[in-house]
Amino acid sequence: MLDIRTFDARQGGNVLYKALSHPLAAEAIAALYGRLAEAGPVVVVDPEDVIEALLALYPDAPALHGLYVQDAMAIGQTRAGLVARSLTELPASGAGSVLVAAFDAQRLVDRIRHLVPAGAAVFTLDAARLPAGLLTNPRRTLDRLNFATNFCFFRDTDSLSTRLVTANYWAGYGAGPVRLWLRLFGAGGEVLATWEEKLPQGEGGVVIDSSEVRTRFGLPAFTGQLFVHAIGVAGHDVVKYALDTFGCGDDPSLSCTHDANAWPSDRYAGLPAPAPGELVVLWVQNSHAAPIPPGAIQLDRMGAERPVAFSHAVPGFATVALDVAELLPGVVWPAQIEVRAGRHVVRPRYEVVRDGRTRIAHVNVERADLAPDPHIPSLPAPLGRGYLLPLPVLPRARFRTLIQPTPMATTQDTLPLRLDVFDPQGVRVAQHALGCLTRDHAVAVDLDDVLPAGVLAEGGHADLVYDFRAGGSADGWLHALVRAEHRESGHAADSSFGAHIFNVPVTYRDEPQSYAGPPPGLSTRLFLKLGEAERRSFALLIYPASGDWHARSDTALVLHDGAGRPVAERRLAIALSGSALVQPHLLFGEALLEQAGPRGHVLVRDTTCRLFGYHGLMGEGGRFSLDHMFGF
């Protein structure tokens, strides 16, 4: 496992990690290593405990002959295989080159210059600092807004094409001009293209289409990853997007997935085993310049504790297809698979191929920092049902819905669960206890086995909640995969997400979560793309409620054009614990959608409650896509 600190649930993302792992930093550090080696014996001054992360991400450093620290309590500690010495011993180090492992290090260098051996050259990590033009705040390198970055699975072949869709939501937080710095890596990690795009001044739409990129740069077919760096941002340091996959020509594929969650993790979960007739591919996309060693990526049937290693190395920034059945033969749906990724990749994508159709979805971060919370079984009454996970039920006349709880923390040995099913008016139409599932369970609930025919013919939703009547423990990190299947065409879509406490005015720990600021989160800002005439967009908006809140939402759906200007507004009143199926072409009409243009979008806004939503596209022949919406 890479010895790096990435994302901490209490403190957020580690900006140093992003600064070191940026593709431009990778190029600069390789050059820095060369200059260090030329200058003679290398020692490191490590005032901020950086050396282990630096060497983990860039192991081809010249031989290090000493490590020196400022913190007296760190003297004698071992870092990167070296025993830390006091900075006062630096003059006797015999160094030919001194690396001060810090950014914005000039002041520190000035303070210790008299300790540097005569004739030794001094280097700092400022050699790997991004150009000032790529920094939102050039005065402070490790400002989190300087690294609003993410990766995106990106592919354009003769049969499949991808499209990243988002909005300049930073404008809503007061940002000035925002632009994207983009780098496309091919399957082998080679750089295929690097370019910039200016975003609309307002909260306008953003579309990056793989076929347009391929044409613009004269590229052959590719399957790789797109690195996205937003500059000039405010409010959010995360690049959020939806990624659509389209079949080209006679290929009937259509799918949608979410952003990549820019922080590498040790483990991921929620990877479904293949059903009969299915091929399940895990796309291993190296998020760093250093190769992933053979055996560093492993798959395990969830709960088995018998991981099987992927025996191939993965070059820096490369993309490799891993056939799940090759590593785990005989493991079939509804079993599920744990990915042990060693912090080499951000949230991976998986692809399911069946009957000539492909669909893309993502796994989720499996946490190692959680323990069962003894308070959850007896939360105070104002929190009502407590943690719940809203899941979509598309119109049952056309769609089948399967729900599979997915362990998402290494300590989750039990999952005591129940499904509460609601119609669009918030009336509970069924309650189904799953009992106390074990970590290695192979359960996927088919709602056809729970609901009578004709119920929810026009759709609704289900809440997955804790139910301790059969025992078990909980930690609040409750996740599930929902799979929708078109009854006639067999086309399917996967989506997965985690539970929260929704729409109560009291708080428990960091719940109900807010888009910005402290809890409780009692407002909504959701993004809905528009689609095209042959692929209409839709959203299933859910008003989940852990306890009692407003009887109905006061929801505004604001149609924006490509520049972010409002075009029209419609309002909805969704019942508590209810839902609404929204189709922009029916809600606004063709004329207004044409006015909004191909980069237009709908902003779902509500200041009275927190809505949750799923969105996608619907096309001809039973084609559709589905994933959870993103908010900002």
Image: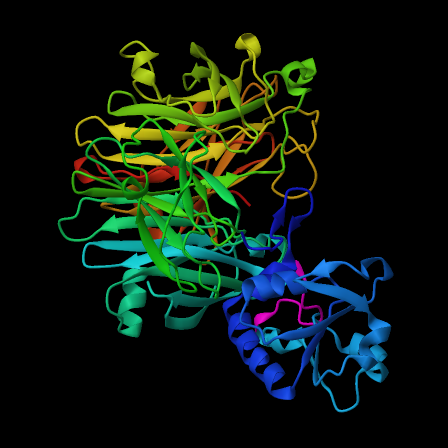
- Which residue is at the far bottom? 119
Residue 139: say if magenta.
yes
Number of dots carrying numbers? 0
Let me know if residue 175 appears in the view: no
- Give the residue at x 53% y 76%: 30
Residue 536: where, in percent of width, then height?
29, 41
Residue 380: where, in percent of width, then height?
70, 16
Is most of the magenta stretch helix, strand or loop?
loop
Q: Which colour scheme appears in the figure? A: rainbow
Residue 75: where, in percent of width, then height?
82, 62
- Give the residue at x 60% y 55%: 4
Q: Nearer the viewer, residue 503 or 272?
A: 272
Q: Nearer the viewer, residue 328 or 220?
A: 328
Residue 44 appears left or right of 194: right
Give the vertical position of 278 relative to 32 (above or below): above
Corner quadrant of residue 314: bottom left
Q: Nearer the viewer, residue 4 or 20?
A: 4
Residue 285 appears left or right of 351: right
Give the vertical position of 539 relative to 143 (above or below): above
Residue 533: where, in percent of width, then height?
24, 46
Which stretch is magenta? 134-144
Let me know if residue 528 appears in the view: yes
Which quarter shows the C terminus? top right
Residue 522: say if magenta.
no
Residue 265 appears left or right of 593: right
Residue 605 appears left or right of 242: right
Corner quadrant of residue 400: top left
Give the vertical position of 219 relative to 406 (above or below): below
